[in-house]
Amino acid sequence: MAAIRGMVDPKIFEQLQADIDDDSNVREEIRNFLQKRERQAFGVVKEALGSAQSSIDEQVNTIRDLGSVASKYPYYKYHHMWSRHTQDTILALIFSVWLGVYGEHEQGTLLTINDVASYMNGKPIETATSIFNVQPLAVPVNVKDRDVFHITTEEYLLALTDLTEELARLAVNSVTLGDYQRPLQISKFVKDLHAGFQILNLKNDILRRKSDAIKYNIKKTEDVVYDLSLRNLIPRNAS
């Protein structure tokens, strides 16, 4: 009687294990960058009002280095690992620039997505538009024709929704510090930002829910301004 031979070649599973090991190595390499960025971020408000320059520089450099490494691998396979970290770095950058404690912009300036990318690539703001079409960047924007690391419109918009929450918190803290004009500026800015979101036809469910929540941050800032007006700390018609 002939010996019964196995129907499954063990080499199939040997190759699968090799693929699993390769994937684990890639994830570990990416995870090292993300853990480094987490150590560099101690809280948006604290850093924005404190030693913003060094903290933001470190986070931006880490994302840039991550971009160089991550672009070697399939974007959509690993995107979920770094998307939130990228979003948080965008938020820290936008918030710090808005406060006037980072970069060369005037206080109250909202960075565009291309401005964000030019900071992350260490390129001058005024050359951002042309650069994206001339040479490969570690952190390009909305890449559709190549499988590389990039920042997306969704990540930028999600960072803006988080910005309104941080600003609402700052409005309250500003009153505690005796700055009664900043809540007025914040209230107007958040309202303008919300008006911009109203123009968008958002398909992303998470982004749509987050943008809907902006109105609650508007309410928080309006409450602060109203309380200041009741206490005659600002003109009653200032809001």
Image (cartoon, helix red, strand yellow):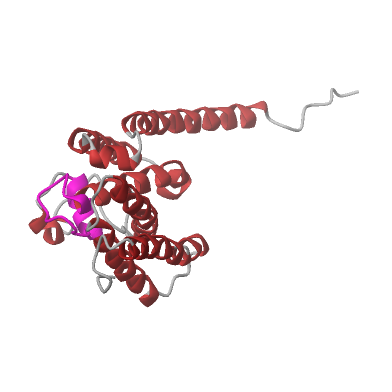
Indicate yes or no whether the magenta region holds residue 219.
Answer: no
**Region rendered in magenta:** 98-121
In the image, residue 3 lies at what x, y percent?
Answer: 84, 22
Q: Nearer the viewer, residue 97 or 140?
A: 97
Q: Is residue 29 placed above or below 193 in the rendered structure?
A: above
In the image, residue 237 lies at what x, y percent?
Answer: 26, 74
Q: Is residue 141 placed above or below 139 in the rendered structure?
A: below
Q: Is residue 228 left or right of residue 202?
A: left
Q: Nearer the viewer, residue 183 or 120?
A: 183
Residue at point 25%, 52% (across, down): 140
Quadrant of the image containing the N terminus = top right
Q: Is residue 151 visible?
A: no
Indicate yes or no whether the magenta region holds residue 117.
Answer: yes
Q: Is residue 48 visible?
A: yes
In the image, residue 50 lies at what x, y percent?
Answer: 23, 36
Residue at point 34%, 54% (across, down): 163
In the image, residue 236 lies at what x, y percent?
Answer: 28, 71
Q: Nearer the viewer, residue 188 or 60?
A: 188
Residue at point 24%, 56% (across, down): 182
- Give the image quarter of residue 214: bottom left
- Give the image quarter of residue 138: top left
